């Protein structure tokens, strides 16, 4: 799997887990740390509480203008000042997946304004979406956010706004994992 990454919760890792909150549905097992590694390099024998695999794919539901704007404003992951992160795995309902692509786009953008909301928080909050629906994983998406501690309030506002959208009515499982690195 090209561009596939494993998010491994266990007793060691680059990120310390601050909290794990099941927003909808069941939680994940307890873990104190998280590592993000290429899926092919994930150590098989390592003690872990859970492992989620997702892959970077093309931006879906986005127009050319939206993609161009996102890429011009978002800073990369791994910035030294971005010592806080959030991993938010999400699974959408069968009703969402029964919709045609244009119907999902209409909910995602025309009604929920997902991209416009996200743009309000760039460049302070960087993000990467990992797709896992077709990988036999328990979630459809793994959303990874990184930000500096002084932008934590902005991140909370972003998440709150997104959870109020029409799109979020289709979320049937969501776990909010907050992290910190030294």
Image: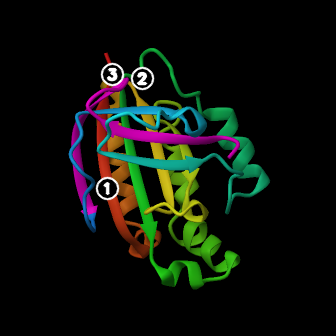
Residue 80: x and y, percent?
45, 14
Residue at horizontal 50 percent and vertical 43 percent from the top:
120
Q: Quadrant of the C terminus?
A: top left
Q: Earlier in the sequence, mark 2 or mark 3?
A: 2
Q: Nearer the viewer, residue 48 or 127?
A: 48
Residue at horizontal 56 percent and vertical 64 percent from the top:
133
Is 164 placed left or right of 28 in the picture? right
Q: Which residue is mark 2?
A: 82
- Look at the image and give the residue range highlighted in magenta: 1-23
Q: Earlier in the sequence, mark 2 or mark 1?
A: 2
Q: Residues within 10 Å of mark 2 (few under 14, many from 20)?
A: many
Residue 173: x and y, percent?
35, 67
Q: Earlier in the sequence, mark 3 or mark 1?
A: 1
Is label 2 in a helix, a strand or a loop? loop
Give the main secondary structure, helix, strand or loop, of the magenta stretch.
strand
Q: Which residue is mark 1?
A: 175
Residue 174, quarter of picture: bottom left
Residue 162, quarter of picture: bottom left
């Amino acid at each position: 799997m090209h561009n596939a990454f494993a998010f491994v919760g266990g007793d060691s890792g680059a990120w310390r887990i601050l909290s794990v909150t099941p927003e909808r549905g069941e939680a994940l097992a307890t873990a104190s740390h998280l590592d993000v590694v290429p899926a092919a390099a994930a150590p098989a024998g390592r003690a872990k509480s859970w492992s989620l695999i997702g892959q970077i794919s093309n931006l879906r539901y986005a127009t050319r203008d939206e993609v161009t704007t996102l890429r011009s404003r978002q800073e990369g992951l791994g910035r030294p000042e971005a010592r806080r992160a959030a991993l938010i795995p999400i699974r959408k309902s069968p009703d969402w997946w029964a919709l045609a692509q244009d119907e999902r786009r209409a909910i995602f953008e025309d009604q929920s304004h997902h991209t416009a909301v996200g743009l309000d928080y760039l460049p302070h909050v960087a993000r990467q979406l990992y797709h896992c629906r077709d990988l036999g994983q328990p979630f459809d998406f793994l959303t990874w956010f990184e930000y500096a501690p002084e932008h934590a309030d902005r991140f909370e506002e972003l998440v709150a706004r997104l959870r109020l959208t029409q799109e979020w009515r289709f979320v049937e499982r969501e776990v909010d994992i907050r992290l910190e690195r030294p």
